[in-house]
Amino acid sequence: MNPGTGVRIGCRAMFILAALTASTAWAVQDCELNGEPVNPANGHATEGRSGILRCRDLDSGQLVREQELQNGRFMGAVRYYAAGRLSREYSVNERGNMQGRSQEFAASGQLVRDASYEDGRQVGLARTYYADGQLQRASFYGPAGELAYAEFTSRGELRGLRCADRPVLAPVVDDARLCGFPLRTSTVAFMAENGAVHARATFVAGKRLRYETFQDNGLPAQQEEVTLTSRVERSFGPNGAKRREVLWAINGGKAVREREQEFAANGALTRERLWTQGELSSESTYYLNGQPRSKARYAMVDNKRLLETREFYDNGVLAAEGRYIDTGRYAPMPTGAHRRYDMQGRLKSESVYDSRGRIIRERAWDADGNLLRDDELSEDSSRKVYTR
């Protein structure tokens, strides 16, 4: 047996065994360094050596990857191949982190991604392309991550946009114009792959002041409007009617909810919630005829947060009222007198609760106002009957 052949077969066997327990990217490969067989999974085989490590597929013999070694360390150029064609190329530094330019290619050889890295962190302008070379996405990365991007359909139409506080996508994309720099209003349409407008936005100096999306029927789906002091969000039903609106107050860059409204399909207000300094202060619901259905209001009394509730019939007549202590849990504790009324507004019943939420008295009246029942309840739930 030729001694050189024995060495090569031995290295192959060891590397195949290592490949079976390592990542699939290294599977069944035959590697050499400067023309000599080598097992890269064995650190002793590459210790102190420099050059280009080349690995080929054992079955086809095609080149799979190339990687630069410097004094026994994988450092410098890295290239991957698919079916004998270059598919990815980048470099790593002494820590093994990506450094400098990184490119990826389609099977045709067309560049599909081009980016830059600094010690493993993506920086600067990055581009991705469709297989035909059409720009798909341009983005810019700073120390905090992605700052801006522009996305395009395969037809070359704008599909999405995020602006930074200054133009950063040139010369690939004219984000100075699209984002409204230096201080101008720019309204842009975002297109779907079929050529239909799926969204529209308005920018001034990189700030998005308005954004709306559309349903397949062309009617609005979502809207957002922003000023220096507020933000409004709206959502719409299939018929284009507004179904929900939320108002936020903006102070010091922090958004605090102030009002939330819900609407029926016919546009009638069905629910409204209000907040004061971030605390829910009231909630109201409405019948479709516009009459109030319920009203709840929070108030501070004797250093306690109380919830006062009222319910109504659809003719506007008061149906019930009561008070609760807000315990901070899902079940507020009833307190004081809770009353119910008939549709003519006449008192029907009354339940009285003590400060611990325990019912202590119950009364009931007939339609003529005659007292039917008056019971006092003890701690053990026994009753003392005053009137029957």
Image (cartoon, rainbow, N blue to C red):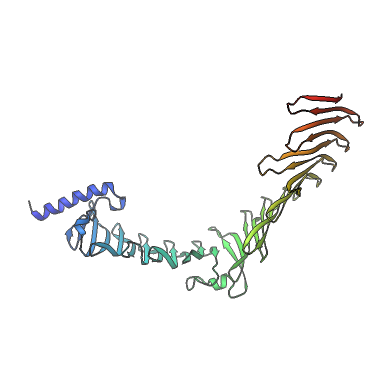
**Residue at the left extreme of this rendering:** 1
Residue sitting at 54 percent across and 68 percent down?
164
Relative to 138, residue 300 above or below:
above
Q: Is residue 244 visible?
A: no
Residue sitting at 81 percent across and 28 percent down?
376
Location of residue 245 (image quadrant) = bottom right
Q: How many marks?
A: 0
Residue sitting at 51 percent across and 63 percent down?
151
On-image quarter of the C terminus = top right
**Residue at the bottom extreme of this rendering:** 182
Residue sitting at 77 percent across and 28 percent down?
378
Q: Percent x, y for residue 149?
A: 51, 65
Q: Percent x, y for residue 210?
A: 64, 63
Q: Is residue 20 visible?
A: yes
**Left or right, 319 with reference to 76:** right
Q: Percent x, y for residue 131?
A: 41, 61
**Left or right, 378 with reference to 116:** right
- Work out whether residue 236 or residue 181 is closer to the camera in this orientation and state it: 181
Relative to 167, residue 198 above or below:
above
Q: Percent x, y for residue 45?
A: 19, 57
**Left or right, 217 with reference to 174:** right
